[in-house]
Structure formats: C-alpha cells, structure tokens
Image (spheres, rainbow, N blue to C red):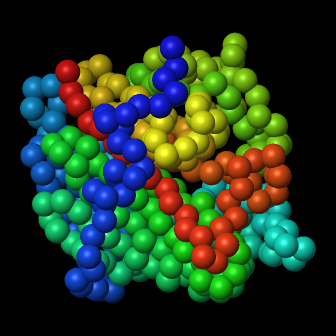
C-alpha cells in the first residue's frame, strides 16, 4: 500500500521550518568548504553552487563510506557538467524551447541544452558563489544568493536561501526558500545529489532496490521535454510502487531512468514520502520525504568515465538522483502545478532524508 502522508517521523513543513530557522550572524563570499557532523553522520559542502560534496554513513557493521559522488577540488566543480550535489535553479529541470509566456509577455531563457533550457541555463545557481550564514558545524549551515533581474533570461530580482541541517542522529533536512522582490517569476529549485549507498567508488547502482511512492509520471519526448500528459506507471518499467531492483527492467528503456514521478497524495502542510532506497551488501537505507509534487528519478545514464573523488571513475549508472521538484516545463503546461511566484509570496521546498543500516 502506498502511504499518502506521514506524521512525526516525517515532520510537518511547519515543524521542520522551526527546526531549520536561524539568526544570521556572519557572511562569507570566498569559496570555502564546510562540514556538519552529528553522531555517525558527516556531511560536507562548498559555497560554490551550494554543493553537497560528501556524506559519510556507517554500514550495518559500522564501516563508514562516502555515499555521494563528487570531486576533490572546487575547480573540478567549476568544470562539472553533471551538476554533482548542486542546488540547481532558478528553474530546475527543463524548459521546452527555452521560452515561456507570463502575464502576456514572452520570456526567452538561455538555451544550454540544444533548443531547451536545463537547470537554469549556462550559469545557473549551480555555478555561482553563494554567501554563507548561520554556520554551526554541529547542526546547520545556510547559503544565500541574490538572483538578478534578467539572469539567464528570468524576470525579476529574487533572494534565495538554502539551509542544510542535521536533525537527531540520522536525519538531514534541506530547506530551499526564495522570494521575488519586484516581478512575478517561475521558481523551481532542486538538489542534484548523486547517491550510491554502497559507496561513491563502488560501481553501478543497478542492484540497489528502490520504492517510489508515485503511481504516475509525466511522459517526455525524445528531448526529455514533457508532453503535458500525466499517465499511470501500471504495467510499465517505471512501476516501483513495490521495492524492486533498479536494474530489473532498465534494459527496456532507452538509456535508463530519467523521468518525473507524480508523488501520491495531496500537496499540503505535511511532507509526503517520496522514495526509499536500500542496498543489500551494506544494509544501508535512505528514506526521502518532501513537500513538492514531483521527484525526478535519474540513473546517470549519460555519465561516461568522469574522474571523481580519490580518482574514482564514475561510469554509466554510477549513481542515482532523486530530485524533488515541481514538474518539468510547468511554465508551458497549464495543467501542471504552477511554479509562478509573485512579489509578496514565498517559495518553499523542503526535503527530509533519514539514513539507517540493518
């Protein structure tokens, strides 16, 4: 049975907002790395792209491994084309034709993937230096960025804030906020972490099992632009309503998984369970909740011999992404949940990860 919502284990958006609320006390705009540690959970970041660079987890025997794909140096992230661990925006995922109409006016965005816009354009939020506020190495860190009117073609000035916070001994909360200052604008942020629960340098993720609490997807054309339909996954290789190996039916797809799932249940004040990923060799388990309507499941289909941390070579299917989000190309599909945020309104995107090992 697919769970529609969860209570304390999942935390309501309002409760998580309280946990993630902080008071500004410092600002830094130099590129640096930062570390959060609590119990056996350790996470590192850089303010270049607000990137999560590593996450150390114990397996069932207590052995620690880094389960996040990435690089050893900031310079490598500057030349990255995979968006490893970054916050992507102003509009994550794709905008078909690199254009949209808002209040009768057409806007042309940066076409950085053929004729389409991907993850905000050539220099999206993943390629800017964020300011750092509220850094406490035992609990939380907040990154901020001021996006300007016309940046990559998007209208209006927008203030953006992302907070990562360790909750208890085994949870990581992520809160992404944005406020338009003077013009309506689309906003859709996403965290683009690549996960491999056996370890970032352990090969492919095809033996991982995944359960997605979503009975529908938004189909795409050959350029990965949504057709506007919302269809059932019943009887297709996209069906993960029950836990199943990622590699079980991946050969039936052109390349692998790269699709937006429509998370079951009503969007509201409570976070909904989006996914559970397990890895049998290490016993590690990752659960994900969110307040967003969709989650992009991507199996790094286009990754080819990327040299990462410790000279590890990441290949096809080397990691999996679970990018909670608004639906791709929502600005061009009136039947999709809107991503338009007006001045005086706020954008809020919450993710909660829970890690265990059995």
Is 211 located above or below residue 100 in the figure?
Answer: above
At 49% across and 46% down in the image, what residue appears? 269
Q: Residue furthest right?
A: 104
Residue 305, image x, y percentages: 45, 48
Q: Is residue 231 visible?
A: yes
Quadrant hosting residue 266: top right
Q: Is residue 30 above or below residue 300?
A: below
Q: Residue at x 71, y 50 (%)?
A: 337
Residue drawn at the location 21% of the way across and 41% of the way down: 170
Residue 37 image offset from top left, x and y in percent: 14, 55
Residue 108 is situated, as x and y percent measured from the top left of the image, at 80, 75
Instruction: Say how many tags the image has.
Output: 0
Horizontally, is 200 left or right of 190 in the view?
A: left
Give whichever of 29, 134 is nearer the camera: 134
**The one of 163 and 345 positioned closer to us in this rendering:** 345
Does residue 151 appear left or right of residue 310 in this picture? right
**Which residue is found at the position 24% from the left and 84% from the top?**
26
Left/right placement of residue 251 relative to residue 42 reads right
Picture quadrant where residue 319 is located: top left
- Is residue 315 visible in the rendered image? The answer is no
Percent across and percent down for residue 87 are 46, 63
Q: Is residue 122 above or below residue 325?
A: below
The image quadrant where one finds the C terminus is top left
Q: Considering only vertical position in the picture, is 137 above or below 108?
A: above
* Horizontal arrangement in the rendering, residue 194 relative to residue 190 (left or right): left
């Amino acid at each position: 049975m697919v769970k529609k919502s969860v209570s304390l284990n999942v935390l309501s958006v309002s409760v998580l907002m309280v946990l993630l609320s902080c008071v500004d006390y410092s600002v830094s705009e130099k590129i640096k790395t930062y570390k959060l540690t609590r119990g056996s959970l350790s996470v590192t970041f850089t303010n270049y792209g607000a990137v999560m660079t590593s996450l150390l987890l114990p397996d069932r025997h207590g052995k620690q491994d880094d389960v996040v794909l990435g690089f050893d140096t900031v310079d490598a992230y500057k030349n990255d084309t995979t968006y490893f661990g970054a916050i992507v925006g102003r509009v994550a995922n794709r905008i078909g034709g690199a254009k949209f109409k808002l209040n009768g006016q057409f806007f042309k965005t940066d076409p950085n993937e053929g004729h389409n816009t991907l993850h905000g354009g050539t220099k999206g939020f993943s390629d800017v230096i964020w300011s750092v506020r509220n850094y406490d190495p035992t609990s939380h860190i907040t990154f901020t960025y001021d996006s300007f009117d016309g940046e990559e073609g998007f209208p209006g000035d927008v203030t953006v804030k992302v907070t990562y916070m360790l909750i208890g001994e085994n949870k990581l909360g992520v809160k992404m906020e944005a406020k338009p200052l003077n013009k309506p604008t689309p906003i859709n942020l996403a965290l683009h972490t690549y996960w491999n629960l056996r370890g970032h340098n352990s090969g492919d993720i095809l033996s991982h099992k995944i359960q997605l609490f979503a009975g529908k997807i938004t189909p795409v054309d050959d350029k990965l632009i949504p057709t506007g339909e919302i269809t059932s996954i019943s009887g297709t290789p996209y069906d993960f309503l029950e836990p199943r190996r990622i590699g079980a039916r991946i050969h039936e797809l052109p390349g692998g998984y790269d699709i937006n799932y429509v998370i079951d249940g009503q969007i509201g004040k409570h976070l909904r369970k989006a996914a559970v990923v397990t890895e049998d060799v290490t016993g590690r388990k990752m659960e994900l909740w969110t307040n967003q309507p969709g989650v992009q499941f991507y199996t790094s289909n286009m990754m080819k011999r990327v040299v990462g941390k410790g000279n590890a070579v990441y290949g096809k299917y080397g990691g999996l992404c679970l990018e909670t989000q608004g639906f791709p190309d929502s600005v061009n599909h009136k039947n999709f949940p809107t991503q338009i945020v007006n001045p005086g309104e706020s954008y809020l995107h919450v993710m909660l990860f829970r890690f265990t090992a059995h």
